[in-house]
Amino acid sequence: MFALIHQPVQNAMQSGVGNSTMWVLDFASKSGQQQIDPLTGTVGTTDVMGEVQLNFDTKEQAIAYAKSHNIPYRLIQRSRHIPVGRSYGDNFAFDRKFPWTH
């Protein structure tokens, strides 16, 4: 059983930063156990640990949980997105790097 500790990325439908500070411990499922259902064509598995997600407030809590339960883990750090402030008029600027196409 192997776990990934990461922060979930922001959904494309979200504009705020809510729930973006939590950390998630995901258990990696064994891909060799996946099987295709002949009737419906869906992929299924007998390993339910691939569906388990544990949420933590901090990275340290997630790491402490994995260590206390002897779960090997991999920590994935997300790079911070720094938004660039621009005005609407910059979309139509003459000295734009890439010309406006329509």
Image (spheres, helix red, strand yellow):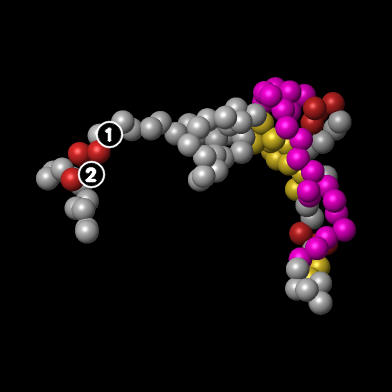
Q: Nearer the viewer, residue 42 or 58?
A: 42
Q: Which mark is residue 72?
A: none
Q: Secondary structure at mark 2?
A: helix
Q: Residue at x 70, y 40 (%)?
A: 4
**Residue 76 in sight here:** no
Q: Of the residues shown, which amino acid type is indicated by label 1?
A: Arg
Q: Nearer the viewer, residue 87 or 56?
A: 87
- Quadrant housing residue 47: bottom right
- Quadrant housing residue 96: top left
Q: Quadrant of the N terminus?
A: top right
Using residue 15 as the reference point, say whether residue 77 is left or right of it: right
Q: Residue at x 76, y 59 (%)?
A: 31
Q: Of the residues shown, which amino acid type is indicated by label 2?
A: Asn
**Given contact means CB atoms under 8 Å apart, are the residues at marks 1 and 2 in contact?**
yes
Task: Give percent across and percent down for residue 8.
Answer: 61, 38
**Residue 67 in sight here:** yes
Q: Which mark is residue 86?
A: 1
C-alpha gap between disc 1 and disc 2: 9 Å
Q: Which residue is mark 2?
A: 91
Q: Secondary structure at mark 1?
A: loop
For marks 1 and 2, the one nearer the N-term is 1
**What residue range appears in magenta?**
43-64
